[in-house]
Amino acid sequence: MPITVQVASHQEDVPGVADIEHWAGAVLDAAQSHAQICVRIVDEAEATALNETYRGRSGPTNVLSFVFDAPERTDPPLLGDIVICAPLVTREADAQHKTSRAHFAHMVVHGSLHLLGHDHEHEQQARDMETLEQQILATLGFANPYALDAAL
């Protein structure tokens, strides 16, 4: 499965390309094994500009997913792009007493699930998506990120 990783952040503790590819790949099932995605790690200025432009919200956000609505015959299919704000993810991890690596993995999994059509706009959708995140992260060796949030 072609996963492109672009690191456009000056932050030094960003996970390696192989880790990001592995985490995103864990989300995509066999039916999507040949799909293409791009994961871009950015600093706050780029995350802020994208969040304001595409979501109408000020400031950066931790992860954005941009689903590509490809023509049916695109081969291999391009699912879309995931943008992760490295400085914000690191600050959140520190505030939530998580490792930066675990929080980055969560953001990659979360963004990848969005590319597959999962959402959390409604309560049941959020529960379903969180359950999938927990299951996938467990297979990757990470603790339930929501249990850690609740423990604070």
Image: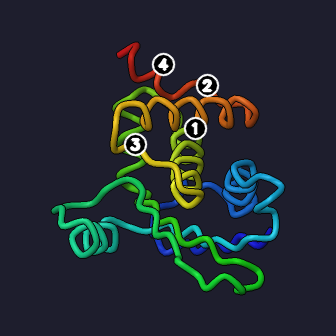
**Vertical relation: 93 (above or below) 113:** above
Which residue: 67% across, 55% down?
Answer: 24
Residue 143 disc label:
2
Label 1 neighbour load within 10 Å: few <14, some 14-19, many 20+ = some
Which residue: 44% across, 57% down?
Answer: 86
| Quadrant that contains the C terminus | top left
Residue 130, position as x, y percentages in the image: 51, 33
Name the secondary structure under disc 2: loop
Q: Which amino acid, mark 2?
A: Ala
Report which residue position mark 1 lands on.
102
**Vertical relation: 94 (above or below) 118:** above
Residue 97, position as x, y percentages in the image: 43, 26
Q: Are marks 2 and 1 in contact (CB under 8 Å)?
A: yes
Report which residue position mark 4 lands on.
147
Q: Are marks 3 and 2 in contact (CB under 8 Å)?
A: no
Label 3 neighbour load within 10 Å: few <14, some 14-19, many 20+ = few
Label 4 neighbour load within 10 Å: few <14, some 14-19, many 20+ = few
Q: CA distance from mark 3 to mark 2?
A: 20 Å
Report which residue position mark 3 lands on.
120
Closer mark to the observer between disc 3 and disc 2: 3
Residue 26, position as x, y percentages in the image: 74, 48
Q: Which amino acid, mark 3?
A: His
Q: CA distance from mark 4 to mark 2?
A: 8 Å
Which badge, 2 or 1, comes first in the chain's sequence? 1
**Vertical relation: 56 (above or below) 90:** below
Q: Are marks 4 and 2 in contact (CB under 8 Å)?
A: yes
Q: CA distance from mark 1 to mark 4?
A: 13 Å
User: Which residue is more in the foreground, 143 or 74?
Assistant: 74
User: Which residue is more in the foreground, 93 or 1?
Assistant: 1
The part of the image, by quadrant, that contains residue 21 is bottom right
Which residue: 68% across, 37% down?
Answer: 136
| Quadrant that contains the N terminus | bottom right
